[in-house]
Image (cartoon, grey):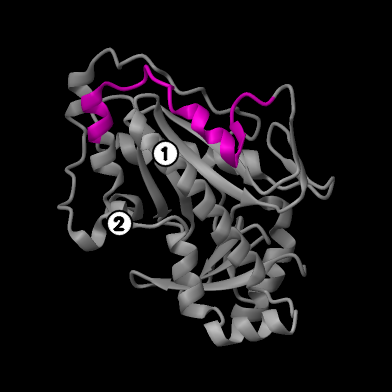
């Protein structure tokens, strides 16, 4: 149970408690008002419920799990246009007006982490004191993650010369966020950054191991995130939106991929430049439409 943390979240009239793994993966969340619990990773169901009962009492209610075949594998993004695009155009949702405060293009890499640290983290004086005294802090992993997102963001910005757009810290309706979105002629890449300084990493079909430790659902979470991104963007586009998941590891010593891992692109931070020449998914007009949609903060918060 010590591996899980309880994280309060209040925004847009909602008051929730999120149960997260050390890497930030949400395994469950609860609405404080209704005491309704949603389990995201069933492996941690018992531990998550025990933690939530400590904060909310014993009268919590677990929401039913959506019916999805547990063995079904995500279908690879289809690059062919729909046969009847005029029918799809009839179902495209109207795009809300973009205001400067809602424009995600203004976000810096690590924007969400930076905001959470500023809101709940230690002051600069407290952090300096901890460094001088060589004291560890629960916030150390947050600062490590922030540094990783900034480093990957810097690499991605280099790809704008190839006609790509980059967005950072895209907040999702469930309280999580997408580290980076890369949008260009090769489609959309939903990029999840993982920072493990000096570590050896192995990535399988759904799980990853750091220094041969316990498995983390990095690949499975990345595939689910890409499906979520595609669903949001296609709500406002009259064409199929190609979205691929990508995991980028920062500061690691070595990286191994399972031979069967083909659903998620796996990179070290300096390797993301190889995405620059990728093309063939979108026309120039489609690239601009997807980017116009993606930079609207409100489209990602629609439930």
Give yes or no for residue 7 being in the magenta stretch: no
Tally of numbered tags:
2
The residue closer to the viewer here, 50 or 270, is 270
Q: Which residues are magenta?
A: 261-289
Q: Secondary structure at mark 1?
A: helix
Q: Position of residue 79 (x, y in %)?
A: 39, 17
Horizontal and vertical percent position of residue 146: 54, 61
Left or right: residue 303 compared with residue 216: left
Closest to the observer, 61 or 291:
291
Residue identifier under label 2: 106
For residue 184, the mark is none
**Label 2 Cα neighbours within 10 Å, binned few <14 / some 14-19 / many ≥20:** few
Per the image, is 285 magenta?
A: yes
For the N terminus, the image quarter is bottom right
Q: Residues within 10 Å of mark 1 (few under 14, many from 20)?
A: some
**Side (left or right) of 16 relative to 260:** left
Depth check: give the residue in front, 198 or 21.
Answer: 198
Looking at the rendered structure, which numbered label has been put on residue 158?
Answer: 1
Name the residue rendered at 37%, 47% in the picture: 167
Residue nearest the viewer, comparing 132 with 73: 132
Quarter where residue 85 is shown: top left
Say what secondary structure mark 2 lies in: helix
What is the CA distance from the residue labelled 2 to the residue labelled 1?
17 Å
């Amino acid at each position: 149970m010590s591996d899980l943390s309880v994280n309060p979240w209040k925004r847009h009239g909602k008051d929730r408690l999120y149960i997260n793994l050390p890497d930030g993966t949400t395994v469950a969340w609860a609405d404080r008002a209704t005491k309704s619990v949603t389990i995201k990773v069933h492996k941690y169901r018992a531990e998550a419920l025990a933690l939530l009962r400590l904060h909310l009492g014993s009268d919590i209610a677990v929401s039913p799990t959506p019916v999805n075949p547990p063995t079904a594998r995500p279908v690879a993004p289809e690059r062919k246009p729909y046969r009847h695009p005029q029918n799809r155009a009839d179902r495209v949702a109207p795009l809300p007006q973009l205001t400067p405060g809602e424009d995600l293009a203004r976000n810096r890499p690590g924007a969400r982490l930076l905001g959470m640290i500023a809101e709940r983290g230690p002051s600069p004086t407290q952090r300096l004191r901890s460094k001088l005294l060589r004291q560890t802090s629960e916030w150390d992993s947050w600062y490590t993650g922030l540094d990783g997102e900034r480093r990957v963001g810097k690499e991605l910005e280099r790809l704008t010369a190839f006609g790509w757009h980059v967005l950072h810290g895209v907040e999702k309706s469930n309280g999580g966020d997408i580290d980076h979105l890369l949008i260009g002629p090769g489609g959309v890449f939903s990029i999840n950054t993982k920072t493990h300084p000096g570590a050896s990493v192995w990535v399988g079909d759904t799980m990853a191991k750091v220094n041969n430790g316990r498995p983390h659902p990095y690949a499975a979470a990345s595939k689910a995130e890409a499906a979520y991104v595609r669903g949001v963007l296609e709500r406002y586009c009259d064409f199929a939106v190609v979205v691929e998941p990508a995991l980028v590891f920062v500061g690691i010593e070595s990286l191994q991929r399972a031979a069967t891992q083909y659903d998620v692109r796996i990179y070290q931070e300096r390797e993301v430049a190889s995405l620059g020449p990728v093309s063939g998914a979108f026309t120039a007009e489609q690239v601009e439409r997807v980017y116009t949609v993606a930079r609207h903060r409100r489209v990602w918060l629609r439930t």
